[in-house]
């Protein structure tokens, strides 16, 4: 994005914070995009934003990394201010939901075993994730273990008998759109984990989420 598009983004980016009393946090349209695709409807692009304590807005990707802002304007916030609607440059309105954050650990066995023949695990702690499609990876690189990607959703079905669920997915980096496996729990659960033998992980919902909700 450059030229007039950058200028437009610079003008309207503050609108989100100015138009509604949004709590600080992460907001994404993960659920809308997912269910639109499931229903074979044209889906909006996946969007994630962070709202800082001072109201400043920044766009982020699935892994929480900063990306370039896109033109938008705020349509409305939805009480209790855990959702926002944004109009994109093409006129489409998309809904973003506020995420709960979680802290996770993960482990995967290294390709080379210990001298006694037992598994040698590469572990990672303090991995930051959120329940609106957030992703985080561990392993890979110099760890000697395969790279594993975790993804989390707080699934609220638009219709049907299925109950809302907190879901933890496992992806491999070369197939980001297809989960290898997943586990689920009640949305009110404080912890969710998974063990596939070749990897294991556990995530705990951060207590600051309750503090933010007050």
Image (tube, rainbow, N blue to C red):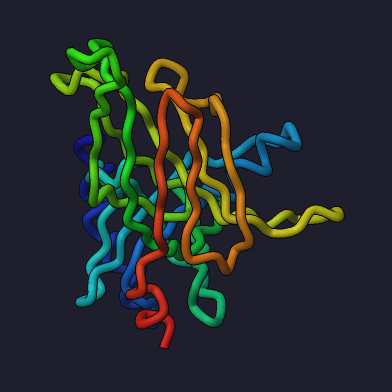
Residue 158's spot in the image, x, y percent? 75, 56
Q: Residue at x 22, y 15 (%)?
A: 116
Q: Which residue is drawn at 41% across and 79% down?
A: 210
Residue 64's spot in the image, x, y percent? 29, 47
Above or below — where is 40 with respect to 112?
below
86, 119: nearer the viewer: 119
Quadrant for residue 144, please give it.
top left
94, 212: nearer the viewer: 212
165, 58: nearer the viewer: 165
Residue 24's spot in the image, x, y percent? 31, 73
197 lies left or right of 40: left
Q: Quadrant location of the C terminus?
A: bottom left
Looking at this rendering, what residue extends furthest in the right direction?
161
31 lies left or right of 211: right
Looking at this rendering, what residue extends furthest in the bottom direction?
214
16, 48: nearer the viewer: 48
Q: Which residue is drawn at 27% across and 28% down?
A: 121
169 lies left or right of 185: left
Above or below — where is 19 with respect to 135?
below
Q: Quadrant location of the N terminus?
A: top left
Q: Residue at x 49, y 36 (%)?
A: 195
């Amino acid at each position: 994005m450059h030229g007039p598009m950058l200028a437009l983004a610079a003008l309207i980016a503050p609108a989100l914070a100015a138009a509604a009393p949004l709590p600080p946090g992460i907001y994404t349209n993960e659920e809308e995009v997912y269910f639109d695709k499931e229903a074979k409807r044209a889906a909006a692009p996946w969007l994630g934003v962070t709202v800082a304590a001072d109201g400043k807005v920044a766009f982020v990707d699935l892994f929480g990394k900063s990306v370039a802002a896109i033109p938008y304007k705020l349509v409305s916030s939805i009480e209790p201010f855990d959702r926002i609607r944004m109009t994109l440059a093409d006129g489409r309105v998309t809904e973003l939901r506020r995420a709960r954050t979680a802290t996770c650990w993960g482990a995967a066995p290294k390709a080379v075993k210990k001298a006694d023949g037992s598994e040698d695990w590469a572990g990672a702690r303090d991995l930051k994730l959120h329940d609106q499609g957030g992703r985080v990876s561990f392993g890979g690189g110099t760890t000697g273990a395969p790279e594993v990607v975790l993804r989390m959703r707080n699934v609220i079905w638009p219709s049907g008998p299925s109950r809302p669920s907190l879901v933890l997915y496992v992806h491999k980096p070369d197939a980001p759109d297809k989960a290898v496996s997943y586990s689920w729990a009640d949305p009110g659960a404080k912890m969710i984990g998974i063990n596939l033998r070749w990897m294991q992980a556990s995530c705990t919902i951060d207590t600051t989420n309750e503090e933010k909700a007050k």
